[in-house]
Image: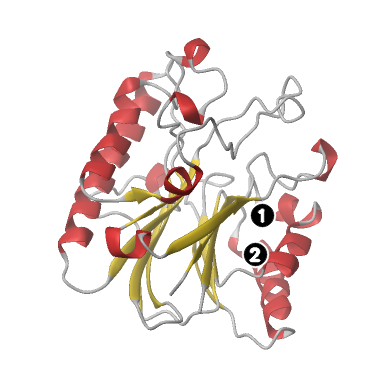
Amino acid sequence: MTTLISTSNLNGMRAAWRKGLGDWIQEALPDVLCAQEVRAPEPALGPIFSAVSDIYSSRGKRLYIAHQVCKIPGRAGVAVFSALPFESLSFGLKGLDDDVDTGRWIEAGVRFKSGMYVTLVCAYVHSGDSADGEKMAQKYRFLDRATSRIEELLAESEGELLICGDLNIAHTPLDIKNSKENLKSSGFLPEERSYLDKWLSLGLKDEVRMLQGESPGPYSWWSYRGRAFDRDVGWRLDYELASPNLADKAERFSIYRAPSYSQRFSDHAPVSVEYEC
C-alpha cells in the first residue's frame, strides 16, 4: 500500500497548463500534489481546477482542492490537489499579515492509505534577493515564523508532519551545480542554509537526500537562461521534509525532468516521493 506525494513550482498555473501540466498529472496521478507559484487570479483557476478534477474522476478518484491566491496580483499562490479527503485545513502563518506573505503556506490534515494521519504543509518561501535588503528581510521573517510553526507541529501528539514545496534554498554544495560561484547568491547564503540545518536538527528528514545519498544533485530547478537545463546546471530548491516515522516509510523518489527544454511546463521539475503507508 503506497501513497505518492508530489510537489511542483508551476511558474504560473495557466502557462504550465498550456505547456503540458495536465499530461504529467494524467501520467503521474499523485495522491497529493502540492503546487507553488500558481500565480493566477481566482476566476482563471476554476476551469483549470475542473479539468484536473476530471482527470482524477476519469480514474475513479474524487479530488479535493485547497488553495490560496496571493493578494499581490501575479505573485506566489499555493494549492493542494488531493485524492485523500482533508480532515483539517489552515492557511498562512500566524503573525505574517503583509500581502507579500499571502499565498505561501497551506496546512492540510490527511490520512495516508494505511490510515496514518499526516499534517501536510504546502510551502512557497520567498526567493529573496541578496542585493535587496528589504526582500531578504521578508524571506528571513517568513523563515523565522515557519521555523516556529514547524516546532509547534512537531510537538503536537497526533500524527506525522510533511513539509512540501519550493523552499528557495539549496541546502549544501551537493544541491547546486556551481556552489563556489554562488556563495553570495540568494538561495545559497549561509544564513539561509542555516534554516534547513535547524529544521533537520528538529528531526525532519530530507527525503530525496536520504534516498539519493551523498552524491551531487538531483536538481529540480534550472534557469531559463544560458542553456542551464541542457547542461544540467541546476539547483535543488524543491523538497519533501518528513518527520522521522513517516520518513522511514519513504521507498523511492523521482524528479520529472522533461525530455527537452521545449517540453518543460515550468522552470522547476515535479519532485515525487512514494511512501509505503
Q: Disc 2 marks which amino acid?
A: Leu
Q: Quadrant of residue 100?
A: top left
Graded by Cα atoms within 10 Å as few (under 14), some (14 to 19) or many (20 or more), the crowding at tag 2 reads some
Residue at (67% x, 50% y) in the render = 256
- Quadrant position of the C terminus in the picture: bottom left
Q: Relative to 27, is 58 above or below?
A: below
Residue at (74% x, 50% y) in the render = 15
- Tell whether label 2 touches label 1 (CB within 8 Å): yes
- Point out the tag, 1 or 2, that comes first from the N-terminus: 1
Q: Relative to 154, is 179 above or below?
A: above
Q: Position of residue 251 (x, y in %)?
A: 49, 61
Q: In what element is the residue under mark 1? A: helix
Q: Which residue is mark 1?
A: 13
Q: In front here: 6 or 34? A: 6
Residue at (80% x, 51% y) in the render = 19
Does 61 sit left or right of 20 as displayed?
A: left
Q: Disc 1 marks which amino acid?
A: Met
Q: In what element is the residue under mark 2? A: helix
Q: Quadrant of residue 267?
A: top right
Asked if one can make out residue 91 in the rendered structure from this viewpoint, the answer is no
Q: Which residue is mark 2?
A: 45
Asked if one can make out residue 69 in the rendered structure from this viewpoint, the answer is yes
Q: Position of residue 221 (x, y in %)?
A: 60, 36
Q: CA distance from mark 1 to mark 2?
A: 8 Å
